[in-house]
Image: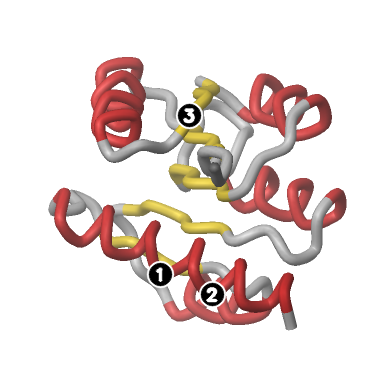
């Protein structure tokens, strides 16, 4: 039996974290959550995470980009998605440089699940190639 894929969700809104966790677990994924960059980095360093879903704004002085850059320093192939209500040229260039999928908030659930499945499938192919 294949082990459940582990998704780390990082967002400073507790209700959104809980909703995402419930949705992912109902779809058969294992999930962990973090409210800020510090919690996220601890979880990334101490767990085997298969995918990172991170909000761009995480409170004063913390960004999702720093969490993703840290995740990639530990696991360069880890699929990452950055959720944001802002979409700038600078952010798009950053996402391209770091191979990160941008998700525009609010994210329709079907789009979120489709993106997560695609990222995990692409990651699996890369590992077996």
Q: Where is residue 83 in the image (x, y as percent from the top left)?
A: 38, 52
Where residue 55 sits in the image (x, y, percent)?
44, 43
Residue identified by numbered label 3: 31
Residue 118 is tagged as: 1
- Label 1 close to label 3 by CB (< 8 Å): no
Q: How crowded is mark 2: few (under 14 residues within 10 Å), some or many (20 or more)?
A: few
Secondary element type, mark 3: strand
Q: Mark 2 or 3 closer to N-term?
A: 3
Residue at x 67%, y 43% (from the top left corner): 67
Give the secondary structure at mark 2.
Answer: helix
Whether tag 2 and tag 1 are in contact, CB under 8 A, the answer is yes
Task: Indicate whether 125 appears above or below 120.
Answer: below
Mark 1, Cα crowd under 10 Å, few <14 / some 14-19 / many 20+, is few
Neighbours of disc 3 within 10 Å: few (<14), some (14-19), many (20+): many
Residue 129: which numbered mark, if any? Answer: none
Q: Quadrant of the C terminus?
A: bottom right
In the visual, does 112 lie left or right of 33? left
Vertical placement of residue 114 versus 107, above or below: below
Q: Looking at the picture, how far across and down is residue 121, in whole percent?
A: 49, 69
* Residue that sits furthest to the front in the current view: 1
In contact (CB < 8 Å): disc 2 and disc 3? no
Residue 89's place in the image compared with 33, above or below, is: below
Viewer-proximal residue, 94 or 18?
18
Q: Mark 2 points at which residue?
A: 122
Left or right for 17, reference 5: left
In the image, 128: left or right of 27? right
> In terms of depth relative to the viewer, which is nearer, 1 or 87?
1
Question: Residue at horizontal 72%, vertical 75%?
Answer: 128
Describe the element under mark 1 as helix, strand or loop.
helix
């Amino acid at each position: 039996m294949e082990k459940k894929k582990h998704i780390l969700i990082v967002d400073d809104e507790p209700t959104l974290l809980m909703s995402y966790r419930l949705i992912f677990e109902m779809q058969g994924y294992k999930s962990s959550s973090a409210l800020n960059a510090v919690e996220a980095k601890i979880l990334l360093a101490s767990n085997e995470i298969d995918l990172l879903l991170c909000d761009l704004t995480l409170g004063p002085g913390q960004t999702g980009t720093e969490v993703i850059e840290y995740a990639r320093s530990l696991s360069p192939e880890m699929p990452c998605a950055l959720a944001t209500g802002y979409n700038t040229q600078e952010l798009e260039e950053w996402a391209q440089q770091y191979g990160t999928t941008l998700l525009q908030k609010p994210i329709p659930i079907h789009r979120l699940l489709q993106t997560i499945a695609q990222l995990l499938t692409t990651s699996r192919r890369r590992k077996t190639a």
